[in-house]
Image (spheres, helix red, strand yellow):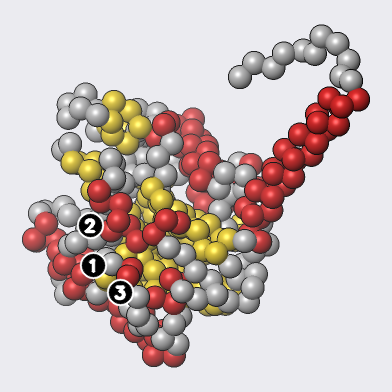
């Protein structure tokens, strides 16, 4: 847009209209800014950041590839670029103001989280960190960042996913209870369910186990309050129609069926959109999901399908030469450094308060 310099002074009438226009613009900006400051809604996002490792070898995990000497040649410069890319996505999802809640997965440890919130412009905001080292063999964990100026953490818990085969390891399930600015209670689950490595059928029991653990905890919450405010989010490594969701977690995909003690998958509506959250062999899928309780569809704090989104900034894509169209702009393609962001797209949800 080109702004032309005024050639002559404004007359009195023009001045009135000009100043009125300026006031309207300022008021509009202030209104949007106030909304994103948490007075009207809380924005919750989830992002699988894909291998956010530091550069130091951890003797207790299999993280050697992500060291300067490893196969990925993971240097301090590459790490810093990765950190700054994650900041950019979080800031852009928040528009005027970073989200009040940020769920993350594929982060290595507390150090990389501290670095993200203290050594990027996120340092201007009072982010608190909920994190615990999980037993995952690669050393990747889930985490939740929340803004202390909006929310207060009442309780946090990490639910261990225990396989019958003790050699298997996966990420814990993060559960947190938070108090909102309007003194509502919000229950948040951050997940990164077992992957599909080894085949869908062979790996499905692991995701069913994770789903059953979340459902058990959700039922415990519902037993105390049938209209509790619950959000289940994360990379579930299954789509909304897969067994782990419909049978294990017992989600419903039609919000018109609103009832208490039920979970509704808002991202089920995203399956018909041009892209999902991850692309594999030319096919888009929605693995990163936002699932809410019936209480959040009609209560004093509420949301809807229209307030659930996949974040699709242009810079998060690159051309898909092999399968046509576009695909997520990754940090690596195999061992080749690609300078991108992640193999997943973020999802976010607005909770009206």
On the image, which quarter does residue 142 sit in? Answer: bottom left
Q: Which mark is residue 225?
A: none
Q: Secondary structure at mark 2?
A: loop
Q: Quadrant of residue 241?
A: bottom left
Residue at the limit of the structure toward the bottom, as seen here? 224
Q: Are marks 2 and 1 in contact (CB under 8 Å)?
A: yes
Say whether disc 2 or disc 3 marks the residue closer to the N-terminus. 2
Classify 10 Å Cα crowding around label 1: few (below 14), some (14-19), many (20 and above). Answer: many
Q: For the view shown, which residue lies furthest in the top direction? A: 7
Which badge, 1 or 3, is on the more N-terminal residue? Answer: 1
Could one spot residue 71 in this view of the protein?
A: no
Q: Nearer the viewer's eye, disc 1 or disc 3?
A: 3
Pinpoint residue 16: horizontal percent, then vertical percent: 86, 31
Tell me, yes or no, if residue 326 can be seen here.
yes
Q: Foreground: 194 or 298?
A: 298
- SS assignment at label 3: helix
| Residue 239 badge | 2
CA distance separating discs 2 and 3: 20 Å
Distance (Cα) linking label 2 and label 1: 8 Å
Tag on residue 257?
Answer: 3
Q: Is residue 86 above or below residue 244?
A: above
Residue at image position (58%, 67%) is 353
Residue labelled with disc 1: 245
């Amino acid at each position: 847009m080109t702004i032309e310099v005024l050639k002559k002074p404004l007359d009195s009438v023009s001045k009135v209209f000009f100043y009125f226009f300026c006031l309207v613009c300022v008021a509009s900006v202030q209104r949007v800014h106030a909304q994103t400051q948490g007075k009207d809604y809380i924005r919750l996002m989830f992002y699988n950041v894909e291998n956010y490792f530091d550069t130091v070898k951890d003797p207790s995990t299999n993280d050697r590839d992500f060291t300067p000497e490893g196969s990925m040649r993971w240097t301090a410069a590459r790490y810093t670029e990765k950190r700054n890319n994650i900041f950019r996505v979080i800031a852009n999802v928040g528009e005027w103001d970073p989200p009040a809640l940020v769920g993350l997965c594929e982060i290595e440890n507390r150090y990389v989280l501290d670095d993200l919130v203290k050594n990027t412009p996120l340092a201007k905001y009072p982010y608190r960190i909920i994190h615990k080292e999980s037993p995952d063999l690669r050393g990747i964990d889930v985490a939740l960042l929340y803004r202390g100026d909006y929310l207060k953490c009442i309780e946090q818990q990490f639910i261990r996913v225990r396989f019958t085969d003790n050699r298997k390891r996966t990420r814990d399930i993060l559960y947190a209870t938070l108090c909102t600015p309007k003194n509502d209670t919000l229950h948040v689950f951050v997940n990164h369910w077992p992957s599909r490595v080894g085949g869908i059928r062979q790996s499905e029991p692991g995701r069913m186990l994770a789903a059953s653990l979340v459902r058990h905890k959700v039922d415990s919450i519902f037993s105390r309050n049938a209209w509790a405010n619950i959000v289940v989010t994360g990379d579930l490594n299954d789509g909304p129609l897969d067994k782990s969701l419909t049978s294990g977690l017992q989600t419903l995909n039609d919000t018109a069926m609103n009832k208490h003690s039920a979970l509704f998958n808002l991202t089920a509506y995203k399956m018909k959109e041009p892209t999902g959250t991850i692309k594999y062999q030319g096919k888009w899928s929605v693995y990163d999901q936002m699932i809410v309780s019936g209480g959040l569809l009609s209560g004093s704090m509420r949301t809807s399908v229209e307030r659930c989104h996949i974040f699709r900034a242009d810079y998060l894509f690159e051309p898909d030469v092999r399968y046509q169209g576009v695909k997520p702009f990754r940090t690596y393609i195999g061992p080749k450094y690609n300078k991108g962001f992640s193999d997943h797209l973020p999802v976010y949800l607005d909770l009206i308060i």
